[in-house]
Amino acid sequence: MTIGIPRALAYHRYGTLWETFFEELGIPHIVSPETNQTLLAEGIKHTVDESCLPLKLYMGHAHALLDRCDALLVPRLERLGKRDEFCVRFWGLPDTVRATFQDVPLLTYDRTSARPDSEKRAFLQIAKSLGKNYRAAANAYRAAQNRQREADFQRLAQNRPLLRAKAPKILIAAQSYIAHDPRLGGEVISLIRDLGAAPICIEAFDRTACHKAAQHISTDLYWTLSREILGAIHLARGRADGVILLTAFPCGSDCLANELVLRRVKDLPVIQILLDEHQSREGLATRIESFLDMVTCRGGVIPPASPRRNHL
Amino acid sequence: MNHSLGVDIGSISTKGVILDDSGRLIAEAYLLTEGNPLGAVRRLLGELQAQLPADSQIYAVGTTGSARRLIGAMLEADAVKNEITAHAVGTLSRHPNVRTILEIGGQDSKIIILNDGIVTDYAMNTLCAAGTGAFLSAQAGRLGLAVEDMGGLAQTAAAPARIAARCTVFAESDLIHKAQTGHSKADLVAGLCNAVASNYLSNVGKGKKITPPVIFQGGVSRNQGVTEAFRRELNCEVLVDPDGPLMGAVGTALLAAKAPKRAEPFRFEIAARTYETKAETCAGCGNYCEIVRFVRDGVGVDAWGHRCEGIMES
């Protein structure tokens, strides 16, 4: 039995946890390839037109695994704590996948309660359904949890030193499934790098600290991921030179969260960039380039542009 | 004499200027791109050269606008700059006190807020072209008008119709309904102009502190109907510089002049060489990037459009 893991949405947050868990249990698993044009096209084909881009990508990734696995891992993530919840796309994900690809068996778990051990219980349940005993399951979960913690720390260690960079520091205010998808945040990050600035992901800041700091911008916003973004923006005040609100079209929670940022964060240059199914990157390049010009010319000088020559 | 050349190749029009070493305009040209940026630039260079004194030499070349990359490769430009920055630099050189620049072009609209000659804030439309020049031309076509005539007609309106301009589709259905219920063409056009201005202010201009002096530029600034609507909405003077459309070209020429000086002067003969662009779809991976190769006299000089470094050789 091979488990298929779509490289989209929560994978960018819990990927290590999932992969390690199956590895430790000795269950074969496969992760879909990095997002590319073909995956996106399949995703668009298999999703209702009004869906958000990340959900379209998710369906593309799920589709890529259909013939290569026996069951898809599709968790239902509702909430992590008492005062926050995930966007409804995460609540309904197993149902959406089931309705889209009728024949594929799903391996799913729920994080519906705010109890601290709810994730562990869910994983033990999964292991049981795969015929593994309690001890093996508990050990696998512990190992998985440790490795995920290490991976989180690694991301923090990668991004944190950038806060001390000499180059203009740009915070990419986006959910991990946007920032770490090569087709979405990846393009933005490489454009920023090419222009000599330092792109910083929100993982430069500790997650718990972010949740706390978010209150400086809004005490009411309850979406888990939006709160982490807001918190990172607050913590970046006085440290980053600019913020890019990177939003996939049409994200409901970002609609509200971005508006809060634009109205309440006045001491940091902020730009909102909307990503959709556009095939041309010219619009994106213009926006990023001009934003960097603005951020850098706050010091008084517009950098002389250099034509970029590409190899053939 | 050390002159600099600036070329702004927009989706609708192509603008070019030559500045002398004190930044004064000594040659200018404005023509339509007509979907052929390479051809447009060739004609543009012809017009500019004709205006140039015989002994002058150009030591800096800058490009801007949506085809800046392509034309930058063609002209071997010293500066290739995005249009927002180029416009800010160009306008500031002429109006050092300006605090707000409103700009509506063919596909983009933007607002630039300045303080003491430094850009402090700006916004640009998200990737949708509603409420820009392209929107106005589409609606002009629907009403059987030339887009240049809209501004004049709008000013004859007795009672401008109320039209939603947030989305081209909504505006079009508003326009059809109003036309069918008996509103005159002048009222409809005036309504469209008002809608473009108020849509701009509630989208791109949202939350921005608009302080005079205000300058309105970009292709749509030639439409007096929209300019008047801005004056009414903002309740202040909105200046339209007759050279406004050239400001991007001026800006990039100034930026090019600051770049490291080139060894050889720019030669207009460069336009006479043969240029080709070859578009192809790379089959190297699942991304199927649309790569454009830029070829001069049969030799590849640049390529773009790829998402990775591994372009397929062909």
Image: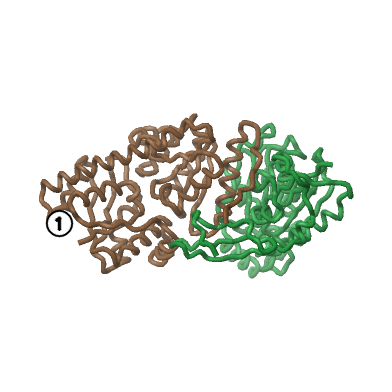
Which color has been applied to chain A in this rendered view?
Answer: brown
Kindly state the secondary structure of the residue where label 1 is placed.
helix
Q: Quadrant of residue B193?
A: bottom right
Circle 1 marks a residue in which chain?
A: A
**Residue drawn where x is 69% and y is 56% of the image:** B74
Q: Which of the 4 image quarters holds residue A104? A: bottom left
> Can you see residue A74?
yes
Quick one: quadrant of the C terminus of chain A? bottom right
Q: Which residue is mark 1?
A: A129
Along the viewing direction, whichever of A35 and B179 lies nearer the viewer: A35
Residue B60 lies, in percent from the top left, at: 75, 45
Q: Is residue B25 above or below residue B149?
A: above
- The crowding category of the residue bearing disc 1, from other C-alpha atoms within 10 Å (few below 14, some 14 to 19, many at least 20), is few
- Residue A114 horizontal/vertical position (percent): 24, 42
Chain B rendered in what hue?
A: green
Identity of the residue drawn at 26% across and 42% down: A147
Whether residue B214 appears in this view of the structure is: no
Coordinates of residue A276 in the picture (x, y in percent): 49, 56
Task: Tell me what residue is drawn at x 39 percent, y 32 percent.
Answer: A213
Q: Quadrant of residue B187?
A: bottom right
The x, y position of residue B277, in whole percent, is 64, 63
Q: Nearer the viewer, residue B56 or A120?
A: B56
Q: Nearer the viewer, residue B221 or B218?
A: B218
Image quadrant holding the N terminus of chain A, namely bottom left
Query: Label 1 sits on what residue type?
Result: Ser
Color theme of the render: by chain
Residue ranking furthest to the right: B54
